[in-house]
Image (tube, rainbow, N blue to C red):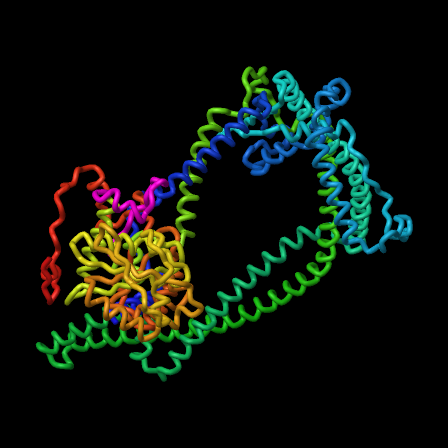
Amino acid sequence: MTNTTSFNQQNNMPDNQEQEINLRDYIRVLKKRKKTILTFLALTFFTVMIGTFTVTPYYTASSQVLIEKNYASGSLENSNPYSFYDPDFLTTQFEIIRSSNVAHRVVKNLQLDIKYKHYFLKNNEEGTFTFFSNLKKGMKSFFSGLFSSKTPGEPAGNQSDKDSLPVTAEPMTDADIIAAVIQGNLTIIPVVNTKTVRITYSDKNPAMAKIVVDAVVQAYMDEILEIKLANSNYSLQWMTSKATEEGKKLEVSELALQKYMRDNDLVTTEDKLAVYPEKLAEFSSQLSKAQAEQKDFESLNARIKSSNGNYQNIETIPIFADNKVLQSLREKIFVAEQNIKDLSKKYGPKHPSMVNANSERDLLLKEKQFEINRIIEATRNSYDLAKSKEENLKQLLAGAKQKMLDVNERFTQYSIMKREVDINRVLYDTLTSNIKKSTVTEQSQEIKIWVVQKAELPLSPSKPRKTRNLELGLLLGLLGGIGLAFFIEYLDNTVKDGKTLERKFGLTVLGSVEEITDKTEKVETFLLKNPLSPFAESYRLIRSSLLLSSPDHPPRTILITSMSPQEGKTATAANLARILSQNNQKILIIDGDMRRPRIHSLFAVPNSYGLSNYLTGITEKNLVKNIEGENISIITSGSIPPNPAELLHSTRMRLLIDDMLKIFDFIILDSPPVQSVTDSLTLSRLVEGTLLVTRAGKTTYDMLESGLKKLHEVRAHILGVIINGLHKNNNNSGYYGYYDYYSKQEVSTQPLKKMTWSSIGQKRHKEP
């Protein structure tokens, strides 16, 4: 139940759970797959080496050329180079250098299709070029026939005339083929942070490489000049015809404008049109001021009227309060009143001094009243004058507007006609100017081309670069081998080590057995011949783990099975029996595999009578066979029956195990694989524990998961797992790897002490 729960918990774990991977895991993979890495490295390196030393060497000649725009010739009126910025300029020039026109110029100038025809065509026509041409023609013919709408056998002439075109494909000439070769071997490399480029050409002959590079530079310069001349001639012809046409349009429009001005008396229209807007603006401004002034006087008169002749209220109005004359009179009146107050303290009201003082004050009051009345009358007159001024300005503004509308209406048509004249004149002047400039700059070059460094005769081949190729082959082989190793490891779904097995299924790994590298040795006898070998120590470790696998007492009846054949379960049963028998324990091996039995052949005993005969009721012969010189007895499988599963499920099988437990200390049952038949599932219910045997690199996790599911369904008690065939380099389980220690140091040859039941927790005690 514990293992079942643990297995179920493991199955419930998410598939994408990440496990910690350290550097040791990567090193383990590299050690494990070192043969794959070295094989891939060797194949890659030797392939590169063979290709490098067998390929035809090519020589490369190069010429460095300055290419830039001639800004001085581009425009007579604009010499700012930034206005001619063209980010695609150099790219365009590269394409011109690589163009078919330049290549054909090279062929023509050097007469390559006449003098050197054999040099370029001796391999191309018979080799690569012809091969690809034939391949292209064959594919084209196949697909055209496959998708053709014609019926089979219909001649080509039956097609309607409307579907045929008067253009036929012309065969490639020798010049075309040589030009294509030159284009293929030509390379343009821009020099960083400069306006120079490096033009290179590769060829099998160093002299031909130099000649072609120089010819390419010259052909490029000729091509640029021809492009310039062709464009200039075409532009000049077009501009001349266009200028004649625009001159006629200009003449017609100017005559029409003169006639309209004469008919509508518009000789001085432009001057008048400039005066009227000024008058309108001036009248509008004066009207606004008059209206504001009239509003002020209107408001002032309204306040005066609202005072109802009360001079004290009137004097509070700002225009009266701020008047200098009234301010002076008010001060004098204040002084006179102060004088009256002082005199009244000394004299009576009829005293001459008092009479004079009162008379002086009354006179001042009359003057103040007169001044107030004068200001009131002046305000009224100003208000009337402002109203009259506003009316006059309105009339002037209206008259000016009317005259402006009349003039503007006539000038609109004048402007339309004059604009047409101006446009025609600009076009005509521009064309005339461009014709003159084109004539001046016709022979000038728009692009500066200067050979900075001429091509030199190459003395050594440029490719193949043997040292670099070998280094790259070595590097690619190593990296590719490592990548292939990890890819194979990723695809490998087989059991590799105990840690992964425990982590995925929650099982206890009792031990791992190293693969025997000596092919002459047999795994079932190696333990007897080499008792102190790491192989033997592996089984001693398995024995210790097995005896401690149960808390109360070690399992006495043990079923050994595997997931599939050839995983080493039978050899494991034999070797485990020998290890257990070294403690003077009596061991019985029952060969429960009645389909493909092997126990009898391992111990060299006859198999004429055995378990199958006993289970069918034949008991007259001795069932148990003792092995001479060992504390091991075996029950062979016997004759192969037609129904092994039914025999193993019988009561006689259970009674046989119970009877044998009275005689032997341990009973080991060898059974068929779990995935093949149900025999192991039947036997697992008759024993105290089941021991699973897996083989590294053979048993898959899917197979193990399916087998464990079957065992858990019958409630089998799984003691643990043994990993067979584990290579020393793959053994990364720290608690299994004691091989180096036992293989490098001597081990004491003293006989092993007998292990008693009490030493391993057994309740009952047995002495020798």
Residue 731 in percent (x, y) is at 29, 47
Q: Is residue 521 left or right of residue 136?
A: left
Residue 76 visible somewhere in the drawing: yes
In the image, 551: left or right of 719?
left
Find residue 556 and report its horizontal and vertical position in percent.
Answer: 21, 64
Q: Is residue 472 magenta?
A: no
Rendering quarter of residue 434: top right
Q: Position of residue 209 (x, y in %)?
A: 63, 20
Q: Quadrant of the N terminus?
A: bottom left
Give the magenta part as a residue range: 509-533
Residue closest to the far bottom: 308
How many marks the image carries: the answer is 0
Q: Position of 14 compared to 355: left or right?
A: right
What residue is shown at x 29% (from left), y 45% (from top)? Answer: 526
Residue depicted at x 67% and y 65%: 402
The residue lying toward the viewer, choosing from 337 and 76, is 76
- 671 or 218: nearer the viewer: 671
Can residue 28 be seen at all in this image of the molecule?
A: no
Q: x and y percent of residue 453 in the render?
A: 56, 18
Where is 238 relative to 670, above or below? above
* Rendered position, 437 above or below 314: above
**In the image shown, does 102 or 416 lie closer to the viewer?**
102
